Image (spheres, grey):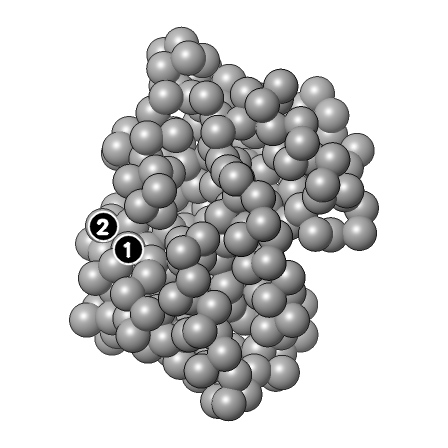
Amino acid sequence: MLIDSHCHLLDERLNAEEEIARMPQDGLFAVVENGFDLASSYRASALAEGHEGVYCAVGCHPEEAAGFEKGHIDEYLALAALPKTVAVGEIGLDYCYEIAPRNVQKDVFIAQLEMAHRAKKPVNLHIRDAYGDAFAILSECRQLLKNGVLMHCYGGSREMVERFGEFDAYFAFGGVITFKNAKKDEIVRAVPKDRLLAETDCPYMTPVPFRGQVNRPAYVRYVVEKMAEILGISAEEAAKLTAENARRYYGF
């Protein structure tokens, strides 16, 4: 059985109810819906609470950091305490488009690491063009990382795999590894096998052979198959490996 460790079923390009109904025939054991601000975190929580096999992470994406308020923390903590909430996420740093000022992103990132520590939940990290600053913050906040760290949609270098390994981090890969010129094989192989997860980040990052279309949780199969090819194992072994790792990390 497959696990999509990071998705956005509530995006308007998808029909969440249809995707969830298809999970058994798509070979999906579970999916993890991720919030990107307070409102989407409430929606993610409601979706998870209402469906078997659906879990959620709650948090404020770095591009939404300017809208984060200290008063939101108690609301996030209440959501994090619910049975189907398995992580705080997606949180982190994104310097690609500078939608939120860097200093604001850093402050909100640290506040949410503290929040996750209070909630005793792992953190799902969105890091883009900011691996150096992210590593520095995680190093300073090492005492807040006891419940787990996941590098969602990992796009860093092989060297940074080793550095984030200092935090016993997990690494999730999505459709990008299937792209012809992705050059991710060496990086995937650099991750310890017991720290590898598969994801879609749907509706984004659609893998080959559906690149250019809307991504779906079912397409995590193609990510897993590419991982298997890279690692020199069977698709069944890769599916079992990534599912077991996701269940260990998330605790379901």
Please report contact status of discs 1 and 2: CB closer than 8 Å, yes or no: yes
Q: Amino acid at mark 2?
A: Asp
Residue 43 image offset from top left, x and y in percent: 64, 61
Tell me which numbered mark, 1 or 2, is placed earlier along the sequence: 1
Query: Please, which residue is most extreme toward the top here?
Result: 234
Secondary element type, mark 1: loop
Image disc number at residue 168: 2
Image disc number at residue 148: 1
Mark 2: give few (<14), some (14-19) or many (20+) Cα within 10 Å: some
Residue 229 image offset from top left, x and y in percent: 45, 15
Q: Nearer the viewer, residue 122 or 136?
A: 122
Image disc number at residue 69: none
Of tags 1 and 2, which is closer to the observer? 1
The residue sitting at 43% across, 17% down in the picture is 228
**28 vs 114: above or below:** above
Q: Amino acid at mark 1?
A: Gly
Quarter of the image where the C terminus is located = top left
Can residue 140 be seen at all in this image of the molecule?
yes
**237 vs 18: above or below:** above
The residue sitting at 73% across, 30% down in the picture is 211
